[in-house]
Amino acid sequence: SESRKLFQASSGPNGDLGLQALAIVGMVALPFDALFNVASLGEKAVVQNGAKNVGKFVLGHAPDYIKVGQKLGAKVFSVPSNIWDKMTDAARWGANQKSIDRALNKGDQLIFSNNPFTARPGSTFEREVGYLRGKGVDIGSIPLVRP
């Protein structure tokens, strides 16, 4: 069966975004106010039984990064729209940052679905690229895979 890693976002006493990891198997509806899913779209990227499994993590403009994730069996940042629509911009970005941090900490191979040097101004992808640069990641070394 397929397992997924889910994280509950919550606001801490100083207003910071805290995350609580939950491992589930199969499809489960969870009534969290701010929930995001680092979805595994293929067998190779699935986290099984809490074991760290180095994989691939795709970033880019929607829907391209989803298509590349499916094509490669890679992880992508994905939030169900009914939850995403209720999240504040700060919660959305905080959840996105945590998914990138987790991929970096696990040593996942980052992949772009779009050219990071021509990211649409003001887009989430542009913000992700800036975040990676701020973390010292060599953007030019990340492979580009077109949808």
Image (cartoon, grey):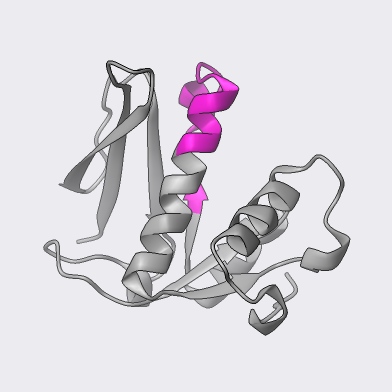
Q: Residue at x 54, y 73 (%)?
A: 110
Residue 140 in picture, x, y percent from top left: 72, 80
State whether residue 80 is above or below residue 140: above
Quarter of the figure that contains the N terminus: bottom left
Left or right placement of residue 31 versus residue 121 in this view: left
Give 102 or 132, whichever is nearer the viewer: 132
Position of residue 54 relative to residue 40, above or below, is below
Q: Residue at x 28, y 53 (%)?
A: 4
Residue 83 percent location from the top left of the image: 46, 24
Q: How many marks?
A: 0
Residue 8: x %, y % from top left: 29, 32
Work out which quarter of the rendered image holds the C terminus and state it: bottom right
Along the viewing direction, whichever of 135 and 79 lies nearer the viewer: 135
Q: Picture coordinates of residue 25 (x, y %)?
A: 18, 50
Chain part drawn in magenta:
77-94
**Position of 108 relative to 27 (above/below):** below
The residue at the point 68 percent across, 58 percent down is: 129
**Relative horizontal placement of residue 72, taking residue 15 as reference (left or right):** right
Q: Quadrant of residue 134?
A: bottom right
> Based on the displayed image, in which of its 4 quarters is residue 65 positioned?
bottom right
The furthest residue to the left: 49
Q: Is residue 29 visible?
A: yes
* Residue at 68 percent of width and 55 percent of height: 130
Q: Can residue 79 be seen in the rendering of this structure?
A: no
Image vertical order of residue 64 relative to residue 26, above or below:
below
Quick check: is 2 in the magenta stretch? no
Q: Is residue 124 left or right of residue 46?
A: right
